[in-house]
Image: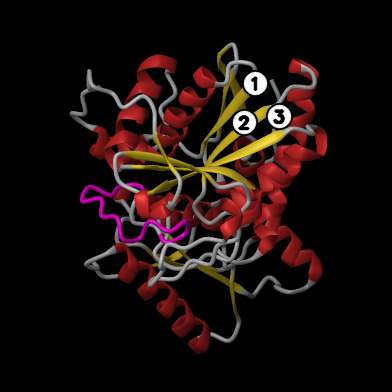
Amino acid sequence: MELFEDLIEAISMPKCIQISENLLALRFESMKLASCSAAVESLLMSGQIDGETTLVDSSSGIYAYALALTCQRYSLPCHIIASTTVDKTLLLQLVALGASVEKVPPSKSLKYDQEFRVRRVHEYLAANSKSYWMRQYHERIHYKGYQEIGTQLGVLLRNEFGNISINLVCAIGSGASSGGLFNGLTRACTDVWLTGIQPFGSISFGSENIEDPDILVAGIGSAIPFGNIEYSIFANIHWLSAEVARQGTMRLLTNTGIFGGLSAGAAYTVGQYLSESDSSNLTLFVCPDMGYRYAHILEGTQISSHIVRAPRWIATLDELAPPWCAMEWNGTPFTPTPTSTHKKDDTNG
């Protein structure tokens, strides 16, 4: 047993759990604490913010909690522009931690929700000169906490499994966690392959024109360009429907006892596929948070006897279609725009 100074120190580090001989889960209680606390500490040390600076950002969930808890730790004011998807349990925690919360009105799409939240951030900054936008989607300072975890993880895996190739499976989201973990992991392990996960409807990897009427995993995709995504580090990309992610979440709970969110379910689905099809290497999938926020979504979900167990591999983005597609990305540059023509460099065919 270990004595911790505060909650952030106690829960920001993940647990590495062996699921099968070559499949591991990296389970966080609340993933973005590692990133947010390291970023705020760095900003304070550099003098970019001080004890009177209000830290501001928009969030659909766990980043809001991470920022509020970090601000409480350092006695900093905090203002959250909350997504329409924010739940009552999270709101209770944010207010109790001292954050002021502005919940945006419902939007007809994820795109309008994200665009409206960013616009509200700019309006807040203009009206409050002593405020600082954390820019979780764009500032590379958010890589820092994940890189440290990745480095420690690399040492652990090398000591336990020797010099083995590693498939790292991450939901992409803002790009900070996948990029930071990958960069840290490669410091200790020389052969690491990064597989990213996206929902249909996200512009980050060109699926914005594919509708998923049941989209529930907005946090792993985007309707606006994210500057923290490092496209050059991804070996493969998998696109999963909300239903495949939901089924994966329930199978993860049933098979392992891990109660994760929908991102964890998506990562487990891809991780299980990779571990079975590439048994000579080690597959590590990331579980970003606990599943309690998603209980109302998962309630009544029955594990289907017709589980989609493998993706349909495609050569171009024009072939994208639910429920599950995969593509060799091979580090190809990509510039997402809402009017993407789904064209990549010729280096990837």
The numbered dot on residue 167 is 2
Quarter holding residue 295: top left
183 lies left or right of 127:
right
| Region rendered in magenta | 203-217
Q: Position of residue 17 (x, y in %)?
A: 58, 20
Residues 300 and 241: in front is 241
Q: Is residue 50 above or below residue 13?
A: below
3 lies left or right of 321:
right
Q: Which residue is mark 1?
A: 281
Q: Which residue is mark 3?
A: 3
- Give the CA distance from mark 1 to mark 2: 7 Å
| Precedes in sequence: disc 3 or disc 2 | 3
Badge 1 vs badge 2, beta-carbon distance below 8 Å: yes
Residue furthest to the left in view is: 300
Residue at image position (31%, 42%) is 241
Q: Is residue 36 visible?
A: no
Q: Position of residue 196 (x, y in %)?
A: 53, 43
Q: Is residue 140 above or below residue 327?
A: below
